[in-house]
Every structure is written in structure tokens, then in C-alpha cells.
């Protein structure tokens, strides 16, 4: 059975419904959850604007990476994607926080 995980860009309409197969452990969780993802390229960059956006979106859990978007081994992004269940909504401040190119965004969504 397939279900959707939604990706939502703060202050914009729904961007994409990512199809993923339902796993047995997914059946235990019946409520949708908003999950936020924050990324800054360097430790010195502030996350305050993105944090505020996640609060306005009422994200129940937020994951933060402080590293360049060029890297594919973003630990918190991978943890977030692994945690997301069918029906959950992933919230990002801007698309470039999730990926640096259209190709990378498509790969991440799949």
C-alpha cells in the first residue's frame, strides 16, 4: 500500500506529494505530524528566520543541519526522512534548504 508524505514550503502552497510504501510500523501511527527541516551552510549563519517559520507552521519536531547543501550525507536530513511516515508534512523555509538543484530535490523526494 502506498501513502503520501507531503513537502510544504513555508508560506506557499503544497509543493509535492512523495509516494512511499507503507511499512508495518507505519500502521501504528495514525496522526499526521508536521516535521520541520532547517539548514544553514555554516555554523556562523543564523537559523532564527527558519526557526520562526517552523514555529508559525506549528512543527512538532524540527531537524537542523549546519553544513553545505552540496553534501549528501546531511545527518539530520536523513534522520528526518527516515522518521517521516505516510500522512506527515515536511516543512522547509525555502526549497534551497532541502536541495541545491532541481535534480537533488527530485532525488530527495524520491
Image: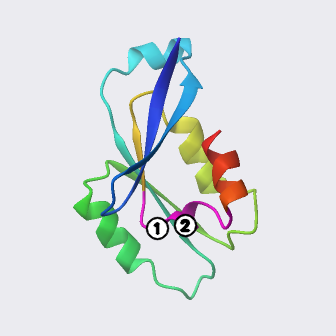
Asked whether the beta carbons under mark 1 and mark 2 sit within 8 Å of each other, the answer is: yes
Which one is in front, 40 or 105?
105
Residue picked out by circle 1: 94
* Up/down of 19 relative to 47, above or below: above
Residue picked out by circle 2: 97
Q: Quadrant of the C terminus?
A: top right
Magenta-drawn segment: 92-101
- The percent coordinates of residue 26 (x first, y second) are 47, 19
Residue 74: tell me if it is visible. no
* Up/down of 16 relative to 74, above or below: above
**At numbered mark 1, what does the secondary structure look like: helix, strand or loop?**
loop
Task: Report crowding for label 2: few under 14, some 14 to 19, many 20 or more residues within 10 A (C-alpha).
Answer: some
Residue 37: tell me if it is visible. yes
| 39 left or right, relative to 53 | right
Question: Going 63% across and 54% down the picture, which residue do you hit?
Answer: 105
Question: Going 38% across and 21% down the picture, which residue do you hit?
Answer: 29
- The percent coordinates of residue 16 (x first, y second) are 48, 44
Report which quarter residue 42 is drawn in: bottom right
Question: Going 49% across and 36% down the picture, which residue do you hit?
Answer: 84
Task: Report crowding for label 1: few under 14, some 14 to 19, many 20 or more residues within 10 A (C-alpha).
Answer: some
- The percent coordinates of residue 64 (x first, y second) are 52, 63
Amino acid at each position: 500500500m502506498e501513502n503520501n508524505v507531503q513537502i510544504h514550503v513555508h508560506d506557499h502552497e503544497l509543493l509535492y506529494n512523495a509516494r512511499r510504501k507503507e511499512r508495518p510500523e507505519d500502521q501504528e501511527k495514525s496522526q499526521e505530524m508536521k516535521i520541520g527541516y532547517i539548514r544553514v551552510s555554516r555554523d556562523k549563519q543564523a537559523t532564527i528566520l527558519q526557526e520562526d517559520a517552523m514555529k508559525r507552521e506549528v512543527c512538532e519536531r524540527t531537524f537542523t543541519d549546519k553544513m553545505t547543501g552540496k553534501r549528501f550525507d546531511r545527518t539530520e536530513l536523513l534522520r528526518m526522512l527516515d522518521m517521516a511516515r505516510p500522512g506527515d508534512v515536511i516543512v522547509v523555509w525555502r526549497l534551497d534548504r532541502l536541495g541545491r538543484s532541481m535534480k537533488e530535490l527530485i532525488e530527495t523526494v524520491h
